[in-house]
Amino acid sequence: GDEGWIWEYDSSDGKYTLTLDNCSISASSDSGIILPGVEKIDIVLIGNNSVVGGGGNGDYNSSGIHNYADNVKLNLKITGDGTLNVKSTGSINNSYGKAISLPNGSLTINSNVVATRGIYAFHNVVIEDCQVDVDIDNHNSALHGGTIDIKNSTVSATVLDEDKDNDN
């Protein structure tokens, strides 16, 4: 679309696709992207993309990307030749307020991602054929999941200096 994103549904396989094409999404008081309670979503990246969750006190509302549905396990895949810079700007505690937060989901990353404030997927995190850089504060884990599987990828974690302004 004109905003740099397209949301599509394929009834043949029941999968939703969110295409981000040089898109910048920034929320002032909620998550940057709130995914619906469905079973399969692909986020396809074209060009350089940015998603920022706004404020909050460390709950899901400060996540860059989040999904919460008790009754549906989401399988989210981030793929494509583009990049994604995703961040949470809220104060964080436990698994809330992450750059990507899937309390009832699995996450597969096949694209280059920079995630500020960690990545959480309750069931599992798979990182394959890409580079993922995770910036965290000293209160949280970089990757948190039931299982974590890294294949043919580079993953780095950097602890943020809490005395500095981290708005970039």
Image (cartoon, grey):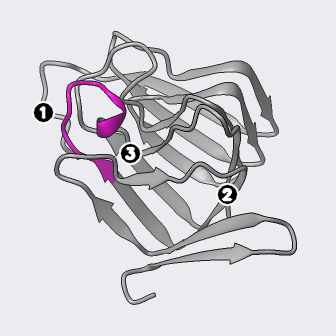
Q: CA distance from mark 3 to mark 1?
A: 18 Å
Q: N-terminal of the two: label 3 or label 2?
A: 2
Q: Which residue is mark 2?
A: 41
Q: Secondary structure at mark 2?
A: strand
Check whether the beta carbons of the residues at disc 3 and disc 2 lie within 8 A of each other: no
Main secondary structure found in the magenta portion: loop
For badge 2, the amino acid type reads: Ile
> Where residue 64 is drawn, which disc sits there?
3
Q: Which mark is residue 165?
A: 1
120 magenta-colored: no
Percent from the top left, x then y, of residue 101?
49, 34
Give the class, few, some or many, for how many residues have Cα within 10 Å of label 2's Cα (few <14, many ≥20). Answer: many
Stretch of the chain drawn in magenta: 52-61
| CA gap, disc 3 and disc 2 | 16 Å
Q: In the figure, is residue 46 to the left or right of 117? A: right
**Above or below 36: residue 68:** above
